[in-house]
Image (cartoon, grey):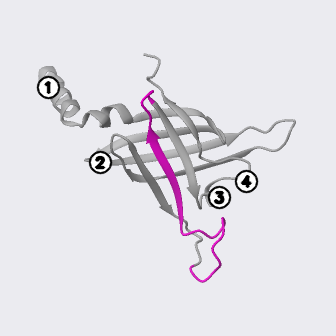
Amino acid sequence: MIRTLLLAAVLTTTALPAFAQEHQGHWFGEGEGNITADLTHVENDIYKISMSTIVPISDQGGGCAGGIDGEVLLDKKGGNFFVENEDYDPKGESSPLNARYCEIGLTFNEDGTLTTEERSGCLYYHGAACGFSGTLEHDAAGL
């Protein structure tokens, strides 16, 4: 039984594309707040992603927090994460608070870091004092 489980684990791991094994997991770093991203391989190039950002309350001002999750298509270089904003009004004027999509670019760098770039429409998912842009390291980077 144990041999069967070990064989299944090895086959599952080797069946994933090499970048799937590198990219999935917990990422953390700083930028427009303390940012985390959790990537879970679903199938092929599809990943579940959950991102959060937080700026703690300090003497200089109030804090900020937010989060977003969904699915993203990734290749070895990265991809673009889109989430449709729930309060989007197609009849309203386009603005940071009335954008159809929140778009976040994800780039896997040669040095092993992940750059996240909030491109547009994400204010609905966090406060004005933070964002999803930053440079993140994989939690296994120190191994």
- What residue is rendered at 38% in x and 35% in y? 23
- Image coordinates of residue 47 in percent, x first then y, are 36, 47
The residue closer to the viewer here, 35 or 5, is: 35
Q: Are marks 4 and 2 in contact (CB under 8 Å)?
A: no
Q: Secondary structure at mark 1?
A: helix
How many residues crowd mark 1 within 10 Å: few (<14), some (14–19), many (20+)? few
As shown in the figure, which amino acid type bears the numbered disc 2?
A: Asp
Q: Which mark is residue 123?
A: 3
Inspect the image, locate mark 3, and give the three-letter code of the amino acid beneath it: Leu
In the picture, the disc for residue 7 is 1
Magenta stretch, main secondary structure class? loop
Label 2 belongs to which residue? 45
> Viewed as shown, does residue 8 lie left or right of 118?
left
Tag 3 near tag 2, CB within 8 Å: no
**What separation in Å lies between label 2 and label 1 (alpha carbons)?**
24 Å
Among numbered discs 3 and 2, the one appearing first in the sequence: 2
Sequence order check: which comes first, mark 3 or mark 4?
3
Q: Are marks 3 and 4 in contact (CB under 8 Å)?
A: yes
Q: Assign the C terminus to one quadrant of the image.
A: top left
Residue range in magenta is 90-112
Whichever of labels 3 and 1 marks the residue nearer the N terminus, that label is: 1
Q: Is there CB contact under 8 Å for labels 3 and 1?
A: no
Work out which residue is located at the far front of the displayed protein and give it.
Answer: 110
Q: State the separation of the CA atoms marked 3 and 2.
A: 27 Å
Q: Position of residue 53 (x, y in %)?
A: 62, 43
Which type of secondary structure does the marked residue at label 4 adopt? Answer: loop
Q: Residue at x 20, y 28 (%)?
A: 9
Residue 100 lies in the magenta stretch: yes
